Structure formats: structure tokens, C-alpha cells
Image: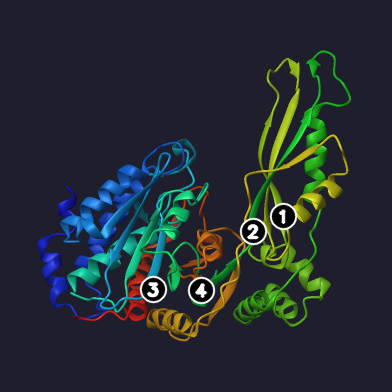
Amino acid sequence: MLDRLIPPALALAFTFAPVLATAAPQDAAAREIYARVIAFRTSAGHAQTPALVASLHELLTKAGVPAADIATLDHGEARAMIVRVPGRERGRSILFSAHMDVVDARPEEWERNPFQLDEADGNFYGRGTTDNKAGVVALVSTILRLRAEGLQPARDLVFGFVADEETAMETTRLIADHEWVRGALFAINTDAGGGLLDETTGRPLIYLVQGAEKTYASFELTVTNPGGHSSRPRADNAIYLLARALGRVEAYRFPVMSNDLTRAYLGAVGQAQEGELGAALRRFAANPNDAAAAAALAKSPEFVGTTRTTCVATMLAAGHAENALPQTAKATVNCRIFPGVPVEDVRQALATAIADEGVKITTLDKPEASPVSEMRPDVMAAIERAVHHDHPGVPVVPYLESGGTDGKVYRTAGIPTFASSGLFAKASEMYAHGLNERLPVTSFYEGLDHIYRLAVELGGARKP
């Protein structure tokens, strides 16, 4: 069935297509690949990344990619893949990265089957349509286009398909340490970076390139006591004590912070944003000590994370029987920590805010900070040209990512990383990790060309 995804006629069309041309058969093939990868339930616990890797491996080898240029990397149930397009010269490689895994979706909660690509109302629907299977397809499409057009890069291009970005990122570490990737010149990460569309008109406002991200850390809040029979309530009910602690976490505000990158980003967005929010963005960029501007941004889910550390309750577990007092109540609080702030300082701040020694606060896993990637002029120039091909004149600016991506692993490994997906969407339509995840159809196809253009320009690809 896979051989039908890239028909011989498409390969022939590629052979005579000029560099950077867009062909309808190419888009049709990419859409079929998109549908295929969405259909794999690649969330933790379903062990589907090996099957998806096998599917992509078969697709690539049937298109002529040598098996020697494909490697698989396993960690537990997860399987990652890297594909090398050899360069004309020896030197440090350039990495392009996407992740195949997704946050799980419950079909009974969705309006559509989350594991079936559905096109409606100008959008593609399905789990992973944005995060990050559009990136997976863009990488596969780029590999196929380079091969079909007979283009060879000046240096090795390596395409990494991560299997556990949404959980432990262990396969990301395996990729970063692989001999094809280790010491790479830089990485382009498709899992972040993109354009904002005006909520009313749909016109492009700004394009963002991720150059840094906040530290991801989770803390477990635990309350325990002997419990007892539900007919004999006690004042220290573990659920109530935990609820009070969470209320204090909700009310606590971490100090306002900024750096050159965040001020530049917020100022640029402010120039493109109208109304009170735009004014607050501009004022904060000019003066981060403007308390009124900071308070206005704190009300915006889109921008609050750029101005401070944030912590939010995400999971609850308590009790063991409906007719028994709870002996244990637990909550997970997830924090996105501003660069430069130690994780332990955040834990201590939560303890101070909760002010209850009966609530035990434990740091989960081993959070790691991510260095800031200094913007490379050549990378920024290539991204600008790729963006302006479809959206002339749109401002292209770096930003701090409030969420977390594989970029922190690559940066920690010494690989400067710049996130750029080529995808544009309205802020109100960004449903990654949420119900009815979607991506504008036009954005998907623009994203394919965006990554291809970056690979050609940054890789110095040409016919041998």
C-alpha cells in the first residue's frame, strides 16, 4: 500500500521540476502521508512509534533512500528514526527535527475520530495535525523532494524523528548523541516557531522563531493522614487540605521578568496587535517595570508565560473508597520557569505560598534548563526569505517559548536550535494537546515548502 503514496509519475514530475517549485502531485502525496501518520496512535502506552517508523522506513526506501542512510534508535517502547542525506563535503551536519509522538486523545470526547485525518471548513482535524505530525510530514516530504530533484547538499542534512518528546525525551537524547548528529552546526526544530493570523481578518501579523524556552518542571503536592470512616469526618481531611494548598498556588504570582529576547518579541507583537493588548505589549517592551502593562499581560494565556514563571495544577488523585476518608491526596503542579531561575527556588516559592508543612512538595524527574541560542544571521535570513515567499513583509522575530520542546535537549547537547515550522494560525485556533486539534489546510502546505526551502538554502543543496 505504501508504494501508492509516491507513484512513479510523481517521481518523474519531480525530476523535471525546477528547484523550489510546487507541484500538485507532491502535495497530494504529502496529504496521504499526513493521513497515514495521523492514524497511528503514537501516545505513551500504545507502543505505536515502532509501527510508524516501519511505515516511514518502507516509504523512504521504496523511494530510493539507501537503507544505510536510515537508523533507528530504541528506548523502551519508543522507537526514533534518523535519516541522512549525505553532503558533497565533510563537515558538521545540520539537523532538522520533528516528533512523532502525541499527547493522547480520547475518541469519546472528540467531535471527530482523533486518529483519522479529517478535512473540513478549511482545516485539517486530528491529533497531531499541529503538534507535531505536520512537522513529521514536512521532513519526509523534504527528503523525498531532495532525492527526486537530484539535489545534494553541501554538508550532511540529518532528519530526526523523535519518539517521546511529549514524555521523557530519551530518544531525543539518543539522536543528539548519534554520530551523524553529535556536534551539529545547528538544528531546525519544526515543533515550535510559526506565524500569527489576525483573529478577525485572518491576515498574517508576525512570524516567530524560537531561540529559547523555559525550564519544564513538575512538582507533586502530597497530603497524608490516617483517614477513617466517612461517617466520622475529621478536620484534617486530606482532600480539603490539598484543595486549600492548590488555591494558594492559584493565587500566587511569580515576579515579573524579562530579557532582551522577550522584550524584542513582545514589542514586535505589540506593533502588530491592536487595542488594549497591543498597547500593553508595547509599554511592557519599553519598560518591564510598568506594573499596569504586566498586569494586563498576566490576563492573557498567550503572553503571561513570556513575562514570568508560571505554575498550574494539571492532575489530581485522592481517596481509595467512596465511604472512607482519604488517606492520601496528591496533585501535580506543572511549572514553566523563566530562564536563569533555579528549579529549587521555584519549589521553595511554592512552599512559601502554600505555608503548610503538612503538604509535602516533591520535584518530579530531573528538570533541566535550556541555554538560549544566539540568533545566527544566516539562519534568520533563510527563515525570513522562506516566510516572505508566501507572506511578503511579515515581521520575523525571535521569541522565548513558554512551553517545552526537544530544543532544550539539543541546546543542552551544544547544538544551537532554532524552531521554525512555517505554520500560520490564529491564537484562538491553536488546539495542540486539546480537543479537536486542527491546522489550516493552507498552512499545512506552506509548512511543507517552508522546511524544504530551509533545507535547500541552509544546506547549500544543488545538483551534483
Q: Nearer the viewer, mark 4 or mark 2?
A: 2
Residue 344 in the image: x percent, y percent?
Answer: 75, 53
Residue 201, which numbered label? 4
Q: What amino acid type is highlighted by mark number 4?
A: Thr
**N-terminal label among 1 and 4:** 4
> Looking at the image, which residue is at 49% across and 39% down?
109
Q: CA distance from mark 1 to mark 3?
A: 33 Å
Q: Which residue is mark 3?
A: 92
Res 410 visible: yes
> Looking at the image, which residue is at 45% across and 72% down?
186
Q: CA distance from mark 2 to mark 3?
A: 28 Å
Q: Which residue is mark 1?
A: 343
Q: Which residue is mark 2?
A: 215
**N-terminal label among 2 and 3:** 3
**N-terminal label among 1 and 3:** 3
Q: Nearer the viewer, mark 1 or mark 3?
A: 3
Q: Quadrant of residue 300?
A: bottom right
Q: CA distance from mark 1 to mark 4?
A: 41 Å
User: Which of the pair 316/404 is nearer the observer?
Assistant: 404
Residue at disc 3, secondary structure: loop
Q: What amino acid type is highlighted by mark number 2?
A: Thr
